[in-house]
């Protein structure tokens, strides 16, 4: 049985076309094949045999995006089994008492939220003590775990949490998705406030 070789002219043309594509792809800042073809046609540069896709190592390295996070499948069966917490601020406008921050505590089971105004981030420890006393009394149960980011205000809580038998779960650095519940709460609160101001025709200073 004889092996059938493709025509040499075809192979050479295909190889040459791919080389020209790679050359222009690099020269023009690594655009997509579709954009590159349009640019070359507008410049009257032949590109009829260019590939519809190409594997470019530099594009893979420079244009890589973080994959979407998978939704957590953790289940919570009692209030205060896990509490999420995060600090928002500073606000460009202070409250009447001078607060420019707030801290939110969000129960993973009920989704109920507690919010405390802060004049500075250093007041987070006091706010947590107030929240702990209030929530545990109202719900007649103890906080089992709290999840925060690695902000220094929360790191200072570690000793107090250990003394009270509360697990401190820290998110991975630069991974705010792991603390998505309070992040979404921040967005809801700020968007609601801005919408109410707009509806009342009030300036942001209110």
Image: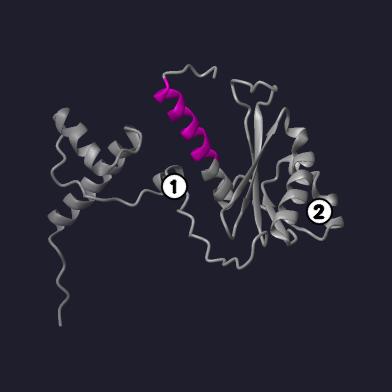
Q: Secondary structure at mark 1?
A: loop
Front-most of residues 67 and 205: 205
Left or right of 146 on screen, residue 204: left
Residue 203: percent from left, percent from top: 48, 16
The outermost residue toward the bottom is 1
- Between disc 1 and disc 2, the foreground one is 2
Q: Residue 83's image quarter? A: bottom right
CA–CA distance in space, label 1 to label 2: 39 Å
The residue pinned by badge 1 equals: 64
Q: Which residue is painted at 57% across and 58% down in the image?
A: 110
Q: Residue 114's image quarter? A: top right
Q: Which residues are magenta?
A: 186-200
Residue 113: percent from left, percent from top: 60, 47
Q: Residue 163's image quarter? A: bottom right
Q: Which residue is painted at 61% across and 44% down in the image?
A: 174
Q: Which residue is painted at 65% across and 26% down in the image?
A: 100
Residue 36: percent from left, percent from top: 24, 37
The prevailing secondary structure element of the residues shown in magenta is helix
Left or right of 24 on screen, residue 188: right
The quarter in which the C terminus is drawn is top right
Marks 1 & 2, CB-CB < 8 Å contact: no
Q: Secondary structure at mark 2?
A: helix
Instruction: Name the mark on residue 161.
Output: 2
Residue 39: percent from left, percent from top: 21, 32
């Amino acid at each position: 049985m004889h092996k059938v070789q493709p025509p040499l002219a075809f192979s050479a043309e295909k190889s040459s076309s791919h080389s020209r594509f790679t050359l222009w792809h690099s020269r023009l800042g690594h655009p997509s094949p579709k954009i590159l073809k349009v640019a070359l046609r507008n410049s009257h540069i032949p590109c009829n045999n260019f590939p519809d896709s190409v594997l470019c190592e530099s594009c893979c390295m420079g244009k890589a995006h973080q994959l979407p996070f998978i939704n957590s499948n953790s289940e919570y069966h009692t209030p205060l089994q896990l509490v999420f917490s995060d600090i928002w601020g500073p606000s460009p406008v202070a409250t009447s008492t001078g607060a420019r921050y707030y801290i939110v505590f969000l129960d993973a089971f009920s989704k109920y939220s507690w919010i405390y105004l802060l004049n500075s981030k250093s007041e987070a420890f006091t706010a947590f003590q107030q929240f702990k006393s209030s929530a545990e009394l109202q719900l007649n149960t103890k906080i089992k775990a709290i999840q925060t980011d690695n902000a220094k205000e929360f790191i200072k809580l570690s000793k107090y949490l250990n003394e009270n038998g509360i697990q401190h779960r820290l998110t991975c650095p630069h991974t705010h998705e792991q603390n998505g519940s309070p992040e979404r709460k921040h967005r809801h609160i700020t968007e609601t406030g801005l919408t109410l101001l707009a509806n009342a025709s009030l300036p942001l200073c209110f």
